[in-house]
Amino acid sequence: MRIELIPRPDPSPVARALAPLAALVVAFLVAGLVVALLGKSPVSAFEVYILQPLTDPWSLRAMLVKATPLILIAIGLSYCFRAGLWNIGAEGQFVMGGIAGSALALATHGSDPGPWLLPAMMLAGMLGGAAWGAIPAFLKVRFGVSEILTSLFLVYVAELFLDWLARGPWRDPAGFNFPQSVVFESAARLPEIPGLDRVHVGVVFAVIAVLVTAVVLGRTLFGYRLKLTGDAPRAARFAGFDAKRTTLIVFLISGGLAGLAGIAEVSGQIARVLPDISPGYGFTAITVAFLGRLNPWGILAAGLVLALTFIGGENAQILLRLPFDLTVAFQGLVLLCVLTADALVSYRPRLVTRAGARA
Amino acid sequence: MTTFEAILFTIVAASTPLLIAAIGELVAERAGVLNLGVEGMMSMGAVCAFAAAFTFDSTLAGILLGMTAGGLMAALFALAVLGFAANQVGAGLALTIFGLGLSGLIGAPFVGQTRPRVEEWPIPILSEIPLVGHALFSQDPLVYVAFGLVAGVAFFLARTRTGLRLRSIGENHVSAHALGLPVLKMRVYAVIFGGLCAGLAGAYLSLVYTRFWSPNMTAGRGWIAVALVVFAAWRPMWALVGALVFGTATVLQLHAQAAQVPLPSQLLAAAPYIATILALVLLSIRRGRAVGAPGSLGTPFVPDR
């Protein structure tokens, strides 16, 4: 028995647009099965994960806050993935952005630095993330080292660096030995959006990133070059597009946006440096990017959906005693289903049994 | 037993899970499939092995179930990338995320439990060899299995007809298909072999190495195993060398922490990852671009009819 794939001559654009939805439905069904196997009711799980957060104003605002890093990182990743480059180390770039911006906040702590501080922190965050993203890009274009492994190993290095800072040099001396820095002063904290309680202005950064990317991809030569480099590298080379330059640029963009997400999260949400500042946003963002079909508007929607699973996951921990790992497993499952659905838009599968093959 | 012999012993033990997982990934990659799900398969192997061993109070049951879990994860991956031609890099990542989450879910009731020590099986005469005898031949049976795997896979790839076919499929699947070789079928077997090995490596971690389960206990070992395959230029014997080098790095790092070397423990913990990056760079400089990688590695194959 085997599966035969028959190429579809012209894949339907409707199917292409609906593929992520189909993937989500399949992932939900499988997750429901897992919940049932754990001896809990899938119906009440669905209620706690999805319906309750969507009907509760506080949860909806929390969802916006969680969606912010996911969308920012995923928008950056979409540049890499479109160019056919596998930056899987956004988590590390997020952490380094958080560190670089926090360095400014802590250096000016108690000195009333003035209104330049927040913009400077955001810029430092972008530079920190971009620098960390530049390492795998440089190693790839200069030495031909695969970016997949180097970008991932740098995640561990960044996390350990943050751990050292929070427990060592940046620890609050008056903090009863807790591994955390002093609380940032209000000058170093991203303000709330007026009228939206507890929602920091990082949300606006995410929306701007979506809008700018929509213009860049749709209306600029750079956007066209990216698409060509990813879809037809040979054609891109003949057209005179420099693949090495593209590699460096997309990693800088991607690292910069992940870094901005990192400092926005620290400055707007956590307000101090902790040994661990991310529940895996950098990895979840990979799922967000593909669920959004690498399209900025798609990523906006996908970011909200995956943010919902974070909120729902926290709810389920409290209400159903379902471990947060269920959320992680679900996110992996979504990615697997989306990639499979993508392939099935181009190919029609047919199950061939042994008897059928002979006939 | 001298201190040197004791350290050598722990180095071999620390290298074993890396070696087993790397050998499995090496076979899959030689067949042309890049499976980045090793970390997830290993984690599932570790948790299922511990759960089974604890429930049935049997190490053997644990090992078998750990391998089964790794194999099933690999089968899921094979269904996506070989059955439906999904992107291999993305699907591998998805498998890792899924495996890490699912293993945490399965393992929650077992956190805090421990298993008894697994008996060592010293081999007569060989274990008496000065210096290295104790480290190599007074180990638990899984270490010998790992050595056997290296020798077996090396022989299989270099000296058997099926091994030659497997390599040709990985090198150029279009030509191999034209010659009538069953490309996808052999790839499915190679991927599942990789999963069984990753599951076994996970079982070694939770049953022999630590003797408990804790979430994320694989701690990047699956990824290091993937890097080892590159490091070894897709040759089994070099995977053995590479695994010992990384095992040494891990153990020395732990000893340095225990000896209170005046360096932050985080820097020492980061050393193996930094070393891996440097090793990959140095090898690329020496070898030039991606020499040794199977030609069809990572590309989906859809046979035309």
Image (cartoon, grey):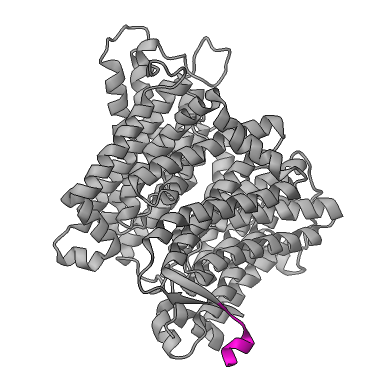
- Work out which quarter of the rendered image holds the C terminus of chain A and state it: bottom right
Residue at (57% x, 16% y) in the render: A177
| Label tally | 0
Task: Name, please, the residue furthest toward the bottom.
Answer: A359
Residue at (24% x, 54% y) in the render: A226
Instruction: Classify residue B71 as left or right of residue A64.
Output: right
- Work out which quarter of the rendered image holds the N terminus of chain A and state it: bottom right
Q: Nearer the viewer, residue A214 or A87?
A: A214
Q: Nearer the viewer, residue A212 or B93?
A: A212
Task: Name, please, the residue furthest toward the right.
Answer: B57
Residue A352 among those drawn in magenta: yes
Where is residue A110? Give x, y as percent.
37, 7
Which quarter of the figure has residue B177? bottom left
Q: Nearer the viewer, residue A52 or A250?
A: A52
Residue at (38% x, 54% y) in the render: A86
Instruction: Classify residue B212 as left or right of residue B300.
Output: right
Residue A284 in sight from this viewpoint: yes
Q: Is residue A143 above or below residue B147?
A: above
Which quarter of the figure has residue A118? top left
Residue A100 in sight from this viewpoint: no
Residue A165 among those drawn in magenta: no
Q: Nearer the viewer, residue A170 or A226?
A: A226
Span colored in magenta: A351-359
Residue at (45% x, 50% y) in the render: A291
Task: Name, please, the residue furthest toward the left.
Answer: A240
Where is residue B235? Give x, y as percent.
48, 71
Where is residue B188? Give x, y as percent.
57, 74
Q: Is residue B284 above or below residue A325?
A: below
Where is residue A182? Give x, y as percent.
47, 14
Instruction: Classify residue A305 as left or right of residue A254.
Output: right
